Amino acid sequence: MSPKKVVISGAGLSGLTLGTALAQRGWDVQILERSAELREIGAGLYTWENGLKVLEDIGVYEDIREHVELITKLDMIDEHQELIHSTPFSSNSRFCVIPRNIVYGGLTRAASRAGVQIETSSNVTAACPSGEVTLENGKTYKADLVVGADGIYSNIRNSLNITKTFERVNNGAVRALIPRLEADSVAHAKEHWSGSRRIGISPTSPSHMYVYLTASSSDEEALSDPLNKEAWISSFPHLETLIKRIDQTRLDRHFYYVFMDKWSSGRALVLGDAAHGMEPNLGQGAGVSITSALELAKQLENHDIDNALDRWETLMRPTVQHTQMWSRIYGSAAAHWPKELLGIRNEVIRKALGSEDVDLMLSTAARHITGL
Ligand SMILES: Cc1cc2nc3c(=O)[nH]c(=O)nc-3n(C[C@H](O)[C@H](O)[C@H](O)COP(=O)(O)OP(=O)(O)OC[C@H]3O[C@@H](n4cnc5c(N)ncnc54)[C@H](O)[C@@H]3O)c2cc1C
């Protein structure tokens, strides 16, 4: 019997993870990527227990482990440098911040080892439920399954007749990698809060620290390119030296959410940001996406395609919905807390994060186990 064939639009983190996991299970995998070359831009990638488990499962972790610095605690600190909350990590609830290019490099090597074929400069414009994709140049491909892992602006999602909501959120971020100094913390990540601005800093490699600065989109002083260092120093005077070290930055003035009634239609489906884009406040957008990719591959290994798609969505939806909801709550508390109530924010957050129920909800994605 000839192997089942899947055509995936998009060689991002989701597409590469699904492609690799399916090729490892005997599928004939073809990935079509719009860009002329394979590369991931960005800085560090918050990666939690779920993401690390996926990378281990598909053989990426072993390849990149020398670049992984496990974090032992993540501290949330207020503008007076008082600790609001500290999250400890252990060997079964791991957390780290890996440079994106390292994760991406590991994924492309794993895909190649598994026999995935990747075609660059291939702009996919549409898919149909019969399992066909169409490219901009008019070419079509037919497969047992076609997948839109083509990101937040997904052409495949937009071509399928499934109800969806695309929402632009008034929060944004600046990201950067800065050279690491001897005095920088080891295995310790911090998130500093001041008014509606936040600065996160964590080790990401022996040579670099990852820094993100988030604010409301209406705070144009904060979300500027080049970075307005004086504006940030005025909110975080104690971080002046760190802010002055920031050089090249990447700016996202807005974040986006995608909500869909269903992630598949016949033999076509959407995966990752294309299906459930979210604000990055919990650092789980990619984590949930690659978890979903592995979940899908495992369901397809054990069930016929129709059943597998139903089971996949039933298993993944609660994790995705919880993560989207709590990401929104976190982002609102950070950037849109009423000014006149800022005096009680620390106490509310301290109580909330100290509650076992809230902790369980915030860590839903990190605790997701695939293939149950
Ligand atoms: C500021 C910020 C910080 C973040 N931080 C984190 C974090 O710390 N941890 C975390 O887990 N997540 C984080 N995320 C979220 C994470 O980046 C995304 O969830 C993740 O990149 C989604 O991967 P994807 O493969 O689904 O989509 P994408 O990464 O968008 O990949 C889509 C791929 O499809 C290709 N493509 C697009 N259109 C076409 C087409 N028409 N034809 C063919 N190919 C196409 C693109 O070129 C790309 O290669 C962050 C996001 C932002 C904005």
Image (spheres, rainbow, N blue to C red):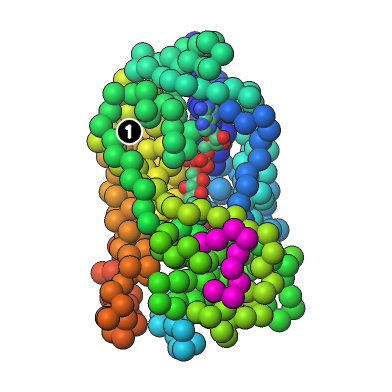
* Image coordinates for residue 280, horizontal then vertical, percent: 44, 56
Left or right of 5 on screen, residue 229:
right
Residue 224 visible in the displayed image: yes
Residue visible at 47% across and 21% down in the picture:
125
Q: Quadrant of the C terminus?
A: top left
* Image coordinates for residue 205, horizontal then vertical, percent: 69, 63
- The local crowd at label 1, few if under 14, some if 14 to 19, many if 20 or more residues have their Cα within 10 Å, is many
Q: How many marks?
A: 1
Residue segment shown in magenta? 223-231
Res 300 → quadrant: top left
The answer to whether 273 is drawn above or below residue 62 in the figure is above
The answer to whether 108 is drawn above or below residue 252 in the figure is above
The answer to whether 187 is drawn above or below residue 22 in the figure is below
Residue 363 visible in the displayed image: no
Choose between 316 and 232: the one closer to the eye: 232
What main secondary structure does the magenta stretch of the protein show? loop
Residue visible at 36% across and 48% down in the picture:
168
Choose between 260 and 185: the one closer to the eye: 260
* Image coordinates for residue 140, horizontal then vertical, percent: 50, 11
Left or right of 69 on screen, residue 275:
left
The answer to whether 248 is drawn above or below residue 167 in the figure is below
Residue visible at 29% across and 50% down in the picture:
321
* Image coordinates for residue 366, horizontal then vertical, percent: 41, 58
Res 230 → quadrant: bottom right
Q: Which residue is mark 1?
A: 263
| Amino acid at circle 1 | Trp
In what element is the residue under mark 1? loop
Left or right of 41 on screen, residue 372:
left
